[in-house]
Amino acid sequence: MNDTASMTSAAAAGSPVDGFLPTIAIVLSLAVAVWALVAAVRQQPPDRIQFAGLAVVEVALLALTVVALVALGGGDRPGEPGAFFGYLVTLVCLPPLAWVLARMEPTRWGSAIVCAICLVTPVVVVRLQQTWEVVGG
Amino acid sequence: MVETRAPERATNRGPGRLLIAVYILFAIAATSRAGLQIATKFDEAPVAYLLSALAALIYIVAAVGLARAGHAGRRVALACCSVELVGVLAVGVLSIADPELFPDETVWSDFGSGYGYIPLVLPALGLLWLYRTRRAPA
C-alpha cells in the first residue's frame, strides 16, 4: 500500500504548482512590471499593453489554479493547506486589483500601481510553491 | 456652509492611489497571515500573532483613511501611520534585542525585513504624503 502511494506521488512528479506554467506567469508578470515602470517614468498613463498584459497574467494564474485544483482532486495535498489556499486566492485577485486601480488612476501613477502589483505577483507565486513543498521536502 | 479651514488636497489621487494599493496588499498579507496563525497555532506565540493581527487592522484602517480622503480620513490615516512607524521601530528594536519576546515572525520583526523593509518605508511615505497634501494646490 505504502509502495503504491509513493509510486503515485513519484509519478505525479511532486508539486503541481512547479514547472512551466508558474514560470511563464512569473516571467509575464515581470515583463508587465518593467513595461509599466517605463511608462511611469515617462509620465504615461496605463496603456493597452499593460491592461492586455494583466489579462494574460491572470489567464496564466487561473490555469495554474485549475492545475492545482485538479491535483487536489487527484488526492495530492499541499504541505500547508491553509497558507496554500490563502496564497492561491490572493494570487488570482492581484491582476484584477491592479486593473481596477489603474482604471481609476489614468495618470503615471496608474502605471506605477500596475508595476508594483506585478512585482508582488511573482513573490506570491514563489510563496505558493513553498507552501506546497513543505512536507515533500 | 462656511469653510474656515484651508482646503486640503485629496489623499486618494495620484501617488496617494499607489500608496493605497500598497496598503491594500499589506492589509491582505497581514490579515490572512495573522488569521491563519491565530486559527491554527495560537498557543505557540500568542503575542506575535496578536501583534500581526493589530498590524493588519492598522493597515486596513490606514488604507480606508487615505481612500476616504476627507478631513476625518486624513486624521485617521495620520494616526495609523504614526502608530505604524512607532510599532515597526519598537518591534524592530525589541525583536533584535530580545528574540525570545517574538518566537515567531511578525510583519514588523527586524524592521519588516521579511517583507523587504516595506513595513518600515510605508508609514514614512504615508506621513510624507499627508504632509505634502496638507494644502490644496494654488
Image: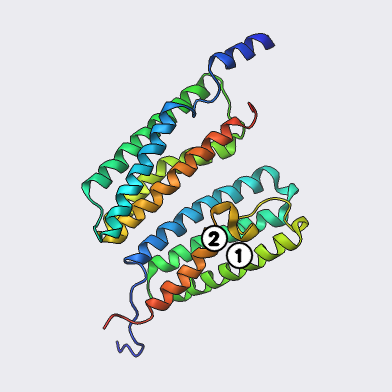
Q: Residue at point 24% right, 58% down?
A: A44
- Residue A21 makes an appearance in the image: yes
Q: Position of residue A42 (x, y in %)?
A: 26, 59
Q: Residue at point 50% right, 22% down?
A: A71
Q: Position of residue A120 (x, y in %)?
A: 45, 48
Residue B119 got which mark?
2
- Residue B73 makes an appearance in the image: no
Please state which of residues A36 and B78 is positioned toward the viewer in this rendering: A36
Please state which of residues B54 and A128 is positioned toward the viewer in this rendering: A128
Q: Is residue B135 left or right of residue B124?
A: left
Upstream in the sequence, badge 2 or badge 1?
A: 1
Residue B88 got which mark?
1
Number of numbered discs: 2
Residue at mark 2 shares a chain with residue at mark 1? yes
Badge 1: chain ID: B
Residue A124 got which mark?
none
Element carrying mark 1: helix
Q: Residue at point 41% right, 62% down?
A: B19
